[in-house]
Amino acid sequence: MELTTVWFVLIAVLWTGYFVLEGFDFGVGILLPVLGRTASERKMIVAGIGPVWDGNEVWLLVAGGATFAAFPEWYATLFSGFYLPLFVILLALIMRGVALEYRGKSDGTRGWDRAFFWGSLGPAFLWGVAFANIVRGVPLDADHEYAGTLLTLLNPYALLGGAATLVLFTLHGAVFLALKTTGQVRERAGRAVRLLAPAALVVGGAFLLVTQLVTGKPITWLTVALAAGALAGALAATLRGRDGWAFAANAVAIVAVTATLFICLWPNVMPAVDPAHSLTVHNAASTPYTLTVMTWVAAIFTPVVLAYQAWTYWVFRKRLTQPQVEVS
C-alpha cells in the first residue's frame, strides 16, 4: 500500500476518533440546559466529561497536524477557503473550554453554562457543514485555491450535513449521560435518546442517501446500512436499559457515517467542481521521505497515546451520583 493511501486512512481514523469522543462532549453541552434542572444536576452533567474532554480534543489537533504534514496542499486550500467557518469553530471551542474550566471557580454558573451550550452547538453543526462541502466539491481554480464565497458553503446539502451531525452528536451525548449518571438525570437522558434516535435516523439517513446518490460509490451502501442499524440498536438497547450497549452502538453509527464520507472522498482529498482542479492523495501529498518519517513516528507513539487514553476512561468509568458532586 502506498504511503499516501496509508496517511489518508490514518487521517480518516483520526477524524473518526475525534467525532466519536468529542461527539458526546458536544452532546453533553447541548443537553445541559435541557437535562440539568438544578445546579447540582448541571454540576453532575459537566463532571461526567470533566476528566476526558480536553483529551478528546487532542484528536482534532493531531488530525490537523497530520493533514498539514502529510497533505500540505490539502491543508492550505482547506484552511484558506474555509477560513471563516473554521475560525468560528475555533472561537466556539475556546469559549467552551474556558466555560468548562471557570464554571467551577465562579459564584454564578449561568453565564458559563450558556457559553458551554453555544460552544458545543456551533462546532457540532459546523463540522457537518464543512465535511459535506468537502465531499460534495467546491470551486477551485487551477492553482487549487478556493474560488467561492461564504454563501457557496451554505448550500442545502451542506446544511443537511450540519443538521445530521448536530442531531447525531446530541444523541451521542444523551446516550453517554444515560450511561454515566444516575437518578433523574439518567431518566431524562433515556427519554432524550428515545426522541433523538428516530430524528437521527431520518436526518442522518437523508444526508447519507443524498451523499451516496451524489458520489455514486456503491460500497457506501454498506456503511449507510451499518449506520442505520447501529442507530436502531442504540434505541433498542436504551429501551432495555443496556446503556453500555447503546453507547457502543451509537459510536458504531458515528464511525459508519465518517467512513461513508471518507470513502466517498477517495481518491480526492479536496474535490473541485471542475474535476481537473481537484486535489488528490497524489498531487496534495508531501514527499515520500516525509511520509516515511511520519509513519515511523506514528507507529511508535500512537499505541502509547491510545493506551493512556484508554486507561483514563477506565479510571473514570463509574457512574456519577448527585451526593458525590458538590453544588457550586
Image: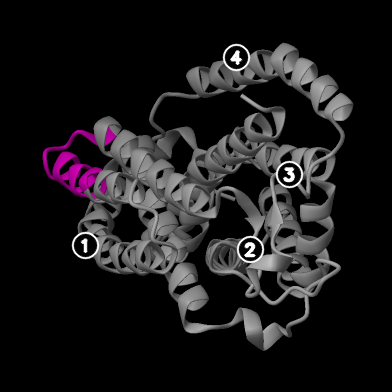
Asked which quadrant contains residue 200, the reply is bottom left
Q: Amino acid at mark 1?
A: Pro
Q: Position of residue 24 (x, y in %)?
A: 47, 47
Q: Earlier in the sequence, mark 3 or mark 4?
A: 3
What residue is rendered at 26% in x and 54% in y?
A: 193
Instruction: Tell me the tag on residue 271.
Output: 2
Would residue 43 be visible to someone looking at this image? no
The answer to whether 302 is drawn above or below residue 135 in the figure is above
Q: Which residue is mark 1?
A: 198
Q: Which residue is mark 4?
A: 307
* CA distance separating discs 4 and 2: 35 Å
Q: Are marks 3 and 1 in contact (CB under 8 Å)?
A: no
> Which of the two marks, 4 or 2, is nearer to us in this view?
2
Between 15 and 244, which is closer to the camera in this rendering? 15
Q: Position of residue 82 (x, y in %)?
A: 74, 70
Q: Amino acid at mark 2?
A: Pro
Q: Earlier in the sequence, mark 1 or mark 4?
A: 1
> Which of the two marks, 1 or 2, is nearer to us in this view?
2
